Image: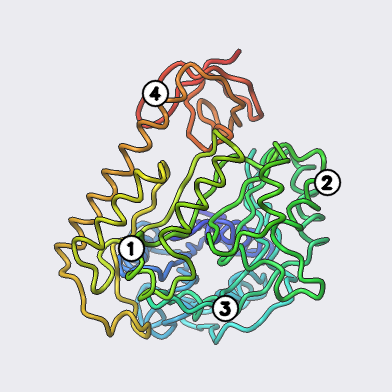
Amino acid sequence: MTAPEIVTFGCRLNAFESDMIRRAACEAGLEDAVVINTCAVTGEAERQARQAIRRARREHPGARIVVTGCAATLSPARYAALPEVDLVLDNRAKLKAESYTALTPVRPLYGQPSPQTGEGWGGGLGSIRARQYLQVQQGCDHRCTFCIIPYARGPSRSVPVESVVAQARGMVETGIHEIVLTGVDLTAYGVDLPERPSLGAMARRLLAVVPELKRLRLSSLDPSEIDAELWALLAEEPRLMPHLHLSLQAGDDVVLKRMKRRHSRAQSVETVCRARALRPHMMIGADLIAGFPTEDESMFRNSLDLVGECGIAFLHVFPYSPRPGTPATRMPAVAPGIVRERAGRLREAGAATLAAALQSRVGATGDVLVEKPGSGRAEFYAAVECPLDVAGIQRMRFSGVAGGKLVGVPE
């Protein structure tokens, strides 16, 4: 091996940052290395990262192993102590080329995250493809009782609007057809900027100034913080895709209160209904946690019923995992076997909702972004199997469903 291999765990933001890591490492001239970009959301994510570290050493005995990401930021000493690891970098250092030029055996460069102005962590073109993430926000000011991420990512801070626009324009010039705006707490965008632009205002500016951008998509949104400008944009702008992914976490009001979430079950349903009233073909995704401490069967049932009630087709299920230092670890735990069983029931409900949603699109037509040979994404985010091998947007008729994907036939 020569160019560094990047192994990514966790969220879309981590995937975006892996592109930036690749660029920084290549700029530094790093070769024969494996960079593990870790996640700290669950204990399972950390276990998988440790497995990847051991596997990287087995498969590349002469390579240097770099560990970074949220888990490494929170527990640098733990990862530095692993015999396979040569360097530990925190979330700030991992994006800088100089962090890799300084690479020496077991020389951790870590510390507490600090506020950033946005310089050096906004864009990240990495490998050229048809769809690209654009990080516009970092960190979180909230303290949900189950979440360790604010301690790894620091406080909320936003990329200035004109910087977002400039980076989006640069992406479009390289051939990007769809940009996905991403962040840790995306709906908090702008609260730290002088003019306090909302997420909706920033997205409207981006679309107005970069008319060549064909598609704009949003990553995870807090249903309690969707601003009026964003609602208006959803109604008026066809280039803003009819797909919302909501950070719901639970469908029971008692559990939501114990999580210190800022929305109720009724607000979740209202948000979905409002989105579909504006865009009838809107597809909904959501995050739900199974087995949160104190959750009994009736509380869980409220979450399970929410999947069908809201028609959540793209469901991310997280079996609750205690994170040391978070308030939820002090609450009465649900037995691990019950947590796994409830996670399975949620996944089954999500799979059934997705299957029904895909079947309902058979016979319809839509624009598909072909991302790689034989594969693309509909405007409403569903994966599409298609017989094309050139990246770009193609009008297709959906002729059937196969393997959890729509089958697209070019018109």
Does residue 108 sit above or below 255 in this rendering?
below
User: What's the CA distance linking mark 4 and mark 2?
Assistant: 36 Å
Q: Which mark is residue 208?
A: 2
User: What's the CA distance linking mark 1 and mark 4?
Assistant: 33 Å
Badge 2 crowding class, 10 Å Cα cut-off, few under 14, some 14 to 19, many 20 or more, is: few
N-term-proximal mark, 2 vs 1: 2
What type is the residue that disc 3 sits on?
Asp
Residue name at image x 60 percent, y 37 percent: 279
The mark closer to the camera, 3 or 1, is 1
Does residue 157 sit above or below 249 in this rendering?
below
N-term-proximal mark, 4 vs 2: 2
User: What's the CA distance linking mark 3 and mark 2?
Assistant: 30 Å
Does residue 254 sit above or below 340 in this rendering?
below
Q: Which mark is residue 141?
A: 3
Residue topped by disc 1: 252
Q: Hey, which quadrant is residue 351 in on the image?
A: top left
What type is the residue that disc 1 sits on?
Asp
